[in-house]
Amino acid sequence: EDQVTQSPEALRLQEGESSSLNCSYTVSGLRGLFWYRQDPGKGPEFLFTLYSAGEEKEKERLKATLTKKESFLHITAPKPEDSATYLCAVLNTNAGKSTFGDGTTLTVKP
Amino acid sequence: GAGVSQTPSNKVTEKGKYVELRCDPISGHTALYWYRQSLGQGPEFLIYFQGTGAADDSGLPNDRFFAVRPEGSVSTLKIQRTERGDSAVYLCASSSRGAHTQYFGPGTRLTVL
């Protein structure tokens, strides 16, 4: 059974204080790993897809990386508007469904 | 362009009642997914359609839950004899043919009293 574990559950940062969120996964065959951002009361918003170990993607202050066992979402010089829950999900090569982690709730204080 | 839409945004019902939740995917998207999300948890897979047929319904918790997509576009999630444990946000997502990225709607918050 596919499993996704995200850590930490919650992270509080000062504005400008860089950090990383972790997503550890177990999957029989990885078709893709996805990062989403979710604001309170809204649906998840797509950020990145990573397909193979060593791949990296960047968007503004966010950078996602992938190894064979985990993915990191690096946040550089965060701003208060980056405050949200960040979700990681894996898609198995043998299935159409995604398995999600429980997310990391990021709070960035000005 | 228009994203995934879901109606209603909120639904309050009484235990034992029947409810229908609607999802309008992004135009042209062939795949449609339903998830359920409880507070503080990630989305939990329920069912996945490719076109009109359910390609994987392994996440439906029991036979009170049923979903249809008769014309390969709009989908309805149906819950019979609702229970308090069914209270959650029900999310719908869609993706285009051959692509893996799922785009989510805003969700329907279901509360069973």
Image: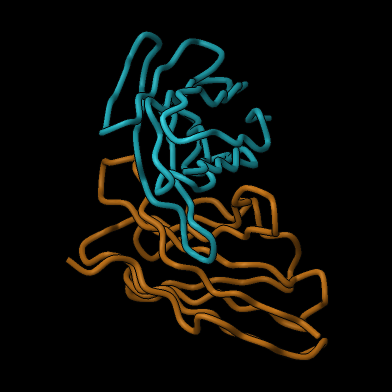
Chain colours: A cyan, B orange
Q: Which of these two is toward me, B33 or A38?
A: A38
Q: Residue shown at 36%/8% (left/top)?
A: A54
Camera sees residue B11 = yes
Q: Residue shown at 36%/57% (left/top)?
A: B94
Q: Residue shown at 50%/48% (left/top)?
A: A84
Q: Is residue A2 left or right of residue A65?
A: right
Q: Which of these two is toward me, B61 or A53?
A: A53
As drawn, the residue found furthest toward the front would be: A110
Location of residue B35 in the rendering, given as x and y in whole percent from the top left corner: 56, 58
Q: Which of these two is toward me, A89 or B67?
A: A89
Residue A1 in which image quadrant: top right
Location of residue B48 in the rendering, given as x and y in whole percent from the top left corner: 49, 55
Q: Residue shown at 54%/61% (left/top)?
A: A40
| B42 is higher (above) or lower (below) than B6 | above
Camera sees residue A2 = no
Q: Which of these two is toward me, A42 or B107?
A: A42
| A99 is higher (above) or lower (below) than B43 | above
Q: Is residue B12 left or right of residue B97?
A: right
Location of residue B5 in the rendering, given as x and y in whole percent from the top left corner: 37, 73
Location of residue A41 in the rendering, given as x and y in whole percent from the top left corner: 53, 66
Q: Is residue A17 left or right of residue B4?
A: right
Residue A23 in which image quadrant: top right
| B34 is higher (above) or lower (below) than A30 | below
